[in-house]
């Protein structure tokens, strides 16, 4: 036991020291998990596993390319139109806000921000963007090896699982695979659920913006695709993400008048109510159910530790940790007096759960 604890401490220390280089491999693990069901189905038909992986890769690349070819043109056009129209939109927004009774300090800060937008983007403002872009370009080389790394994980998954099972002491195997199954259940529901929720929220937002374009103001239709993609992507950040996604839509609508801003706010509230009350309970169940205060705390801590990726993964990591703690607490607790048997039934080895 002391040897295992020492090894885990050393491993944790090394991972913490190299945490900045781990992001591509975390993304790679998510990729492996998403592609694994399709690879398994193809393999069961008699197709060699390495061919099955290449076929799945080809299908995924084809879908991504087709999706980009369908959306990239209109999206670039909307971004260009937004940049061209930004001074006029800022002028409209400034005209409406002039009538509000605001404290002088707040009004001065808003005037300064609007003036900066109207005058164009200062080079100094672009410096953080340039730094982020440079960091992304340098990290892209780390992501280039991920398809190859994921290929070998997918190809040898069964052998790696069997090797891990043999390396465990027999007395530990049941509990170890039970914990793997718990973590896998949380992450499976979260990954597939977030992808579905993001797509659903994006499509619902797009449809709503098109309806508002026809009934309220044309400004909604001009940037419908851009705003709906923002809404779908920000869905990865629970609670905070939908609020951030609504801000640009409401501000944009405010340039067309208070009624348009109220209509945009109602649209985003309706989409979130649809998601929270109908979709989330059915898709994710109670696997990642956390109190909002815990969710916000996890987002802040995850973002501080690992940036945006840490904030995105904070929810499933916290939920999995909660479920593992509950399981271990029950396993290690003494049986209640008068309870039948000597404790909870030993879990089944989930070679099934992973492989």
Image (cartoon, rainbow, N blue to C red):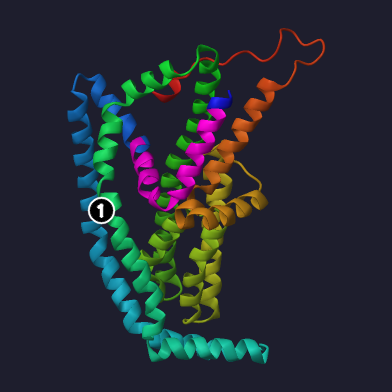
| Whole-percent x, y for residue 54 in the image | 19, 35
Q: Residue furthest top?
A: 341
Q: Secondary structure at mark 1?
A: helix
The magenta segment is 4-32
| Whole-percent x, y for residue 193 in the image | 46, 42
Residue 100 visible at all: no
Question: In this rendering, would 21 be left or right of 238?
Answer: left
Q: Quadrant of residue 47?
A: top left
Using the image, determine if residue 109 lies above or below residue 284.
Answer: below
Magenta-highlighted stretch: main secondary structure?
Answer: helix
Q: Which residue is mark 1?
A: 67
| Whole-percent x, y for residue 246 in the image | 51, 66
Using the image, determine if residue 323 lies above or below residue 166.
Answer: below
Q: Quadrant location of the N terminus?
A: top right
Q: Quadrant of residue 72?
A: bottom left
Looking at this view, is 152 or 214 the one in front? Answer: 152
Q: What residue sits 46% from the left and 43% below the top?
A: 14
- Tell me, yes or no, whether the highlighted magenta stretch contains residue 208: no
Q: What residue sits 38% from the left and 51% below the top?
A: 21
Q: How many marks?
A: 1
Q: What residue sits 50% from the left and 22% below the top?
A: 177
* Residue neighbourhood size for the residue with mark 1, other residues' Cα within 10 Å, grouped as few (<14), some (14–19), many (≥20): few
- Tell me, yes or no, whether the highlighted magenta stretch contains residue 30: yes
Residue 147 visible at all: yes
Using the image, determine if residue 190 lies above or below residue 328.
Answer: below
């Amino acid at each position: 036991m002391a040897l295992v604890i020492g090894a885990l401490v050393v491993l944790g220390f090394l991972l913490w020291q190299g945490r900045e280089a781990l992001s591509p491999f975390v993304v790679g693990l998510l990729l492996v998990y998403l592609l694994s069901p399709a690879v398994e189905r193809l393999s069961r038909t008699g197709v060699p596993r390495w061919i099955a992986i290449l076929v799945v890769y080809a299908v995924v690349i084809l879908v991504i390319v087709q999706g980009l070819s369908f959306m990239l043109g209109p999206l670039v056009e909307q971004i260009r139109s937004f940049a061209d129209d930004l001074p006029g939109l800022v002028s409209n927004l400034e005209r409406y806000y002039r009538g509000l009774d605001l404290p002088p300090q707040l009004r001065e800060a808003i005037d300064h921000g609007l003036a900066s937008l109207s005058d164009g983007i200062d080079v100094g403002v672009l410096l953080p963007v340039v730094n982020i872009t440079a960091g992304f370009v340098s990290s892209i080389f780390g992501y280039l090896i991920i398809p190859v790394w994921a290929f070998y994980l997918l190809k040898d998954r069964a052998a790696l699982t069997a090797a891990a099972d043999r390396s465990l002491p027999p007395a530990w195997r049941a509990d170890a695979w039970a914990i793997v199954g718990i973590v896998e259940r949380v992450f499976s529901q979260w990954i597939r659920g977030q992808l579905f929720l993001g797509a659903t929220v994006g499509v619902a937002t797009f449809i709503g913006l098109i309806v508002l374009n026809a009934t309220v103001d044309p400004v909604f239709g001009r940037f419908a695709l851009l705003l709906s993609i923002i809404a779908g992507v920000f869905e990865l950040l629970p609670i905070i993400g939908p609020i951030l996604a609504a801000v640009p839509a409401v501000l944009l609508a405010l340039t067309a008048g208070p009624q348009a801003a109220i209509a945009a706010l109602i649209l985003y509230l309706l989409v979130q109510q649809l998601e929270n009350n109908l979709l989330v309970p059915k898709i994710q169940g109670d696997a990642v159910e956390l109190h909002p205060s815990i969710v916000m705390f996890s987002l802040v801590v995850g973002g501080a530790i690992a940036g945006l990726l840490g904030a995105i993964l904070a929810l499933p990591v916290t939920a999995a940790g909660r479920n593992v703690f509950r399981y271990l607490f029950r396993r290690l607790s003494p049986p209640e007096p008068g309870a039948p048997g000597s404790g909870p039934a030993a879990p089944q080895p989930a070679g099934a759960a992973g492989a």
